[in-house]
Amino acid sequence: MPAAARPLLVALRAGAALILLLLLLDPAVRRPGAAGRPLVLLDTSLSLTAAGGQGRAARDSAAAWGEVRPFGDSRLAPALRAAAADERRVVVVTDGVIRDLAELPPDLLARATVRLFPRAPVADVAVTRLEAPSRIALGDTLRVTAEVVRSGPATGPPRVELRGAA
């Protein structure tokens, strides 16, 4: 081996040893100022941003309260478990529609502060069942049976209109 290559090999071995030592020691790297700020778990599910939801106010408030980490699909348990590994205060910002509420360990939930941004009741109508023949002949009468469900502060009977291509 040429003498000129020896210092390079020594430097590479020293670098590999340093990397191995760092992996074994596993030092934590913290961002300055993050330790004092609360960890804010922000609900990013569709229910918070749907009609009557307060998604924008929830986002703005969460950003003002601390370091924001989103959780979606109304599943809080995985995000809360991950936040428990941190020693900071935890704030949950949600509209209250949490699918996995029954799965949340009480000790984890007790550790968090919950800020609710409830949805305002909105009038809504949905067709939940529709029955009609799969085909009819020209001149036949089309009979359609529909089940319509209403929620929210709606008044009067729902209006259903069938339109066809001419």
Image (cartoon, rainbow, N blue to C red):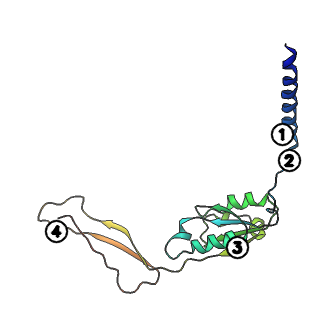
Q: Residues within 10 Å of mark 4 (few under 14, many from 20)?
A: few
Q: Which residue is mark 2?
A: 27
Q: Earlier in the sequence, mark 1 or mark 4?
A: 1
Residue 72, image x, y percentages: 60, 61
Q: Earlier in the sequence, mark 4 or mark 2?
A: 2
Separation of residues labelled 1 and 4 (CA atoms)? 77 Å
Say which residue appears at 81% left-offset and 59% top-offset. Answer: 32
Label 3 secondary element: strand
Q: Residues within 10 Å of mark 2 (few under 14, many from 20)?
A: few
Separation of residues labelled 1 and 2 (CA atoms)? 8 Å
Label 2 secondary element: loop
Q: Which residue is mark 3?
A: 114
Does residue 12 appear left or right of residue 155 in this picture? right
Q: Are marks 1 and 2 in contact (CB under 8 Å)?
A: no
Q: Earlier in the sequence, mark 1 or mark 3?
A: 1
Q: Which residue is mark 4?
A: 141
Three-letter amino acid code of the residue under disc 3: Val
